[in-house]
Amino acid sequence: MRRGEILALRWKDLSFDSQALQVTRTLEETAAGLAFKEPKSERSRSTISLPDLAIEELRRHRRRQAEDLLKLGVRQTEETLVCCNHEAQPLRPRAVTKSFADLSHKLDLGIRFHDLRHSHILHLLDAGVHPKVASERAGHASVSITLEVYNNHRISGIQEDAAKRIDAALRTHLERRI
């Protein structure tokens, strides 16, 4: 997900039963302040399936958030943001980026917040997930965008991998003939 999509996510956008979330809006920071708006493209309005580990952590986060808000006299609702400050107010996107940059620097990771999105898509493609599925998860307007952007990052090993796969298939076929 994009930073703004994550920061606009409400509990009602998440289904623990179907283990999925709906991207329905984004949070934007302008000179005038914070504003919720439509996602980047129609394809950005997507449903994203979540792994068990993410669902487990989101359940724990929801419980902790409800307890923390209750101490302040604020009731958590379905409209409450999943990622918010201690008073249930939206986080400033630039502040999230800066906090992540500080943490990345402190841990000597050398990555930006947006690199997490790129890494996820690259890992999906490297794991053999169909490009259409990776494209849908990314909310890209078309599969060709996903392939154009991400295959440039992966191209160096793709030809070698293809040659190895062809070699293995040919050897298997030749061994069967003998």
Image (cartoon, helix red, strand yellow):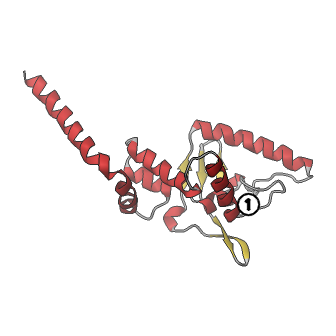
The answer to whether residue 13 shows anywhere in this view is no
Badge 1 crowding class, 10 Å Cα cut-off, few under 14, some 14 to 19, many 20 or more, is some
- x, y percentage for residue 16? 65, 43
- Most foreground residue, 61 or 100: 100
Residue name at image x 17 percent, y 28 percent: 172
The answer to whether residue 72 shows anywhere in this view is yes
- x, y percentage for residue 9? 67, 57
Residue name at image x 57 percent, y 56 percent: 112
- x, y percentage for residue 26? 63, 65
Give the quarter of the figure containing the C terminus. Answer: top left
Residue extending furthest toward the bottom = 32
Image-quadrant location for residue 84? bottom right
Residue name at image x 44 percent, y 51 percent: 134
The residue that mark 1 highlights is 91
Q: In the picture provided, is 143 more to the left or to the right than 82?
A: left
Residue extending furthest toward the left = 178
Give the quarter of the figure containing the N terminus. Answer: bottom right
- Most foreground residue, 4 or 25: 4
Image-quadrant location for residue 81? bottom right
Name the amino acid, label 1: Leu
Image-quadrant location for residue 55? top right
- Most foreground residue, 47 or 110: 110
Residue extending furthest toward the top = 178
Q: In the picture provided, is 69 more to the left or to the right than 82?
A: right
Instruction: Please tell me whether mark 1 sits on a helix, a strand or a loop.
Output: loop
